[in-house]
Every structure is written in C-alpha cells, then in structure tokens.
Image (cartoon, grey):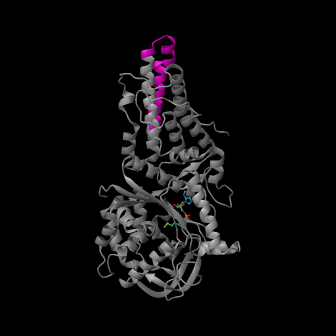
Amino acid sequence: MTEQKNLLITTPIYYVNGSPHIGHAYTSIVCDFFTRFYRQHGVETFFLTGTDEHGQKVAQSAEQEGADPITFCDRNSALFRNLADRLHVGYDDFIRTTEPRHKEFVVRMWQKFEERGWIYKGTYNGWYSVRDEAFYDESEIKDGKAPSGAPVEWKEEESYFFKLSAFTEALLEWYEKCPEFVSPSGRLNELKAFVKGGLTDLSISRCTFSWGIPIPDTNHVIYVWLDALFNYQSALDTPEKFETFWTNSRVMHVMGKDIMRFHAVYWPAFLAALECTPETLSVAAIEKACHNMRIVTHGWWLSEGEKMSKSLGNTIDPCELIEKYGADYVRYFLLREPSFGFDGNFTKEGFINRITGELINNIGNLCQRTFTMTHKNCGSVVPTVKVSHPLLEQDPRVEMLELMKEYKINQAIEAVLSYASKANEFVQESKPWALFKAGDQAKGEEVMFILLSAIFAIKEAIAPVLPEFHARISEVFGNQSFAAGVKLNPLPKVFEQVAA
Ligand code: MSP
C-alpha cells in the first residue's frame, strides 16, 4: 500500500431484516476506533456506513410483517443509524441502497460490465441460502446446510451471469503478490483454498421476486451482493469525493470473517472487470483496482461461551447495554476483550471485571486523586515547574501506532493501561499528599505536574476508545493544550460504578 494521506474506512452495510445486535455494534465501533485513531495521526479519513436493503431476505421479512418493503426498510434502517449515533460512531455518510444515488450508480456499473463482455444470460441450477443471500456449490453443502449453518434451497431460474470463472488464476496470483490484502493472515489460506477449487460463474440477477434494483429492459433485479458492494463507491457521490477517497486513497474494508469471501473474491473481480475485458484480464487489472485496498476481518462474538442465536435466546442487545452502562463502557469492553481478528466472548463477569479493574480502579483512580490534590494544593492550576521524568518522555500513542500496524487494538489499549499503571505507581512512590502536608510545596507541585501531564497523555491516547471520557477530561483542562498555568475546572465523576 503506498503511503497516501487519505483513507476510506467502511463497515459492511447492514441488512435491515431485523434489529441490530452486538455484532453490528462491534463492526461499527471498530471502524469508529480506526477513524479516530488515524485522524489523530493526521490521516484524512472518510468513514462510511449504511444499510443493505434489497434482496429476498429483506423482502420476506417485510412480508411477514405485512409491511410494504420501503416502509419496513425506513423503520429498520433508522434503528441502525440510531445505534451508531448512541455509540458515538461518527460516520461521515450513511448510505442506504434504496437511495437514487446508489441505484443509478449500480445500473451504470451493470452497463459497463455488459459493454466489456462480462455478462451473459443462462439458467441457475443450484443451492441458495436466503439467510446468507449466497449461492453455494454442491461440494460446500454439509448435512443439507450451508457452511455458515444456514438452510439452503434448490433454485432453478433464469439468470444473468458474471464471468467469475475467468478470475481463478488472476486472483490466486494477486493473493501471492499481495498477501497483506487480507488480515489476519491465516484467513488468506482459507481464501486461497476456496479459489483454488476453481471459481464458477456467478449468478448476478434474480427474477422470482422484485425487491431489488431493476435491470433495464428485463424482468430481473440485480443480485443483492453486487448491488451492496458498490455502496463503497456510490456513496462517494461527487467527483471530488471519489477522487479523494477512492482514486487517491487507501481503502480499509472492515467486516466479520463470515463475509470475507464477498469482499476478497467478488469485489476485486467486479472492480477489475471495470478495467478490462475477459480477453485482456490479467493480475494487472486486479492490482490496478485493489493495490490500495485492505480487507480487514474480525472474529465473531459469543455470548457466555456460546454462539449467539435467537433460538437460544442469548443474543445481546446493544441498546440495552448502552442504556445500562453507557456508550464508553460498551465500546471499551468490545475493543479491549478479543484479540482483534479472532472471536471474542461476551460474559457479564468479564465485562464488569474489565470496567472495574482497568477503567475505574486504574485510569479513574489516577484522575480522581490527581485532580483532587491539584484543586486542594495547587489552586486548581497546572503548576509552573521545571522537572524531568520518564512519564514525561513517554507517550503511549507511540507504542500504539506501532501495534496498530498489525491492527492489534487490544494490545494498543493495554499500552495505555500500562502507562496509567506506571503513573499510579509513581503516586504511591512519591506520596504527594505527604509532601504537601510536610510543607514541601515545590516537590509536591513537581509531582502534580508529572501526573497531570500523564493524565493528559492518557486521555488523548484513549480518545478513540472512550470519546465521552476524553470530552470530560478535556473539559477539566478547559479544552486547552497541556501547559503550566492552565486553570482546571471542577472534576465531574470520572467513571460511574458498574452494577452487576
Ligand atoms: N449486508 C451484508 C454486508 C454487505 S457489505 C457490502 C451483511 N450484513 S449483516 O448485517 O448480516 O452483517 C454485518 C456485519 O455484522 C458483518 O461484518 C458480520 O460479520 C457482523 N456480525 C454479524 N453477527 C456477528 C457476531 N455474532 N459477532 C461479530 N460480528 C458479527 O452481511
């Protein structure tokens, strides 16, 4: 990836067939974390999210409610937007695939495929899963189910096809050439195995229902994944935006591991197909389309050690969690708990332990006592002193930046915690309360300066995780940069206790 300054970060667009769950909240929080983190480091970032509203699954869910599809989509899309807002997920655009800007764009892409000879008409005979909105090869079906465990049905219907089979070799060459295209690296092997099995042409239209983008002059609608993937471009709806955040930008597509195939196989193929014809296809077309793109996958959330499912009744409602604990705590636990890229386990005990041990007792305690002592002994002002100390030399963000090269989010948070622990140890060793009591004002002020500076560094480093905490502590510093003489405002409660 070349060192371009701009960056597009995307969440998958969420299906609106149901209300959001913790998995959706997680992907959005991760992207928001990335966005805030890279912006801190001067990268101009555009953060895109939205909802995926077409297809059979959404049509069926609307029908079950007896609702008209667009009314149904309007209502459920708003739930996703609302969840993002409540979590302080600061997207720059929220695209809906039912918007004219998107539909027009996708039809134009369809026409380009046709012009370049990528589409032909045939009949699809094979397995389809409505839940995954995916076609599966016979060899992938186990015990009558898709690899995801979703039920499948046999389909025979007229369909337009995309010549995906032409991409087998070129994609394999691309994965060899750019192994960092997909992360974590282990997933690349899974991908290679799938492609090595030989790609078959992809059915890209449906004609047995109508809830989709109509293909002009036919009775077909566009296959929901072809429709959905192009949201990443259709949302960049002015030439300037497209130029800045696509053509001259790095692109980070973040998603759960379950939908890697669509992003690491179909999406590069679609993009490359816009650049060439089946006759001129080579790895160069994929490279041209994808050299600045990364497919960043995360694991799944389990609930108390089990796979979440409606039938087990163990799904976690992110809105209830926010209601009970507040957005910062939810963000903290989700980002802190799993090794990024791998599965995480949501347990109530784990949640309470992390919040209490790491936020309240470590960072919270440091802030509480430092500010209290400054108010009491230093006239609520950052003291003017000349002092040196390792805590002043170190900035946790430097270590975080290094760890983030491999998206090690949980370790990056650990780096902040370990810095906070060192500051707490320094309080214990230097005993500022005793210094003040003994009348050693100068020494006491030196200690307070070091601690206040450490708190300032912590609130900056942790800002991408805890935006509310960042705002609270910034307010104490009068929303100013750290400097001697800055007057401190009274301290509100740093962190609320968590109820079991
Ligand atoms: N609409 C498609 C994406 C189209 S993108 C061009 C889709 N939507 S989804 O709503 O089903 O899933 C969205 C995201 O939620 C995916 O990244 C998926 O991995 C994630 N999760 C769904 N359940 C999850 C967990 N239990 N745990 C973590 N994330 C999971 O797929």
Depicted 119 relative to depicted 148: above or below: below
| Image x and y of residue 330, in percent | 58, 47
Q: Is residue 201 visible?
A: no
| Residue at image location 38% in from the left, 54% down from the top | 44
From the viewer's perspective, tell me whether residue 359 is left or right of residue 390.
right
From the viewer's perspective, tell me whether residue 168 is left or right of residue 302.
left
Q: Is residue 315 visible?
A: yes
Depicted 137 relative to depicted 255: above or below: below
Judging depth in this view, the residue of 190 and 381 nearest the camera is: 381
| Image x and y of residue 197, in percent | 41, 72
Judging depth in this view, the residue of 155 and 368 nearest the camera is: 368
| Image x and y of residue 194, in percent | 43, 69
| Residue at image location 48% in from the left, 72% down from the top | 102
Residue 422 in magenta? Answer: yes
Q: Quadrant of ligand 1?
A: bottom right
Q: Quadrant of the C terminus?
A: top right
**Segment colored magenta:** 416-442
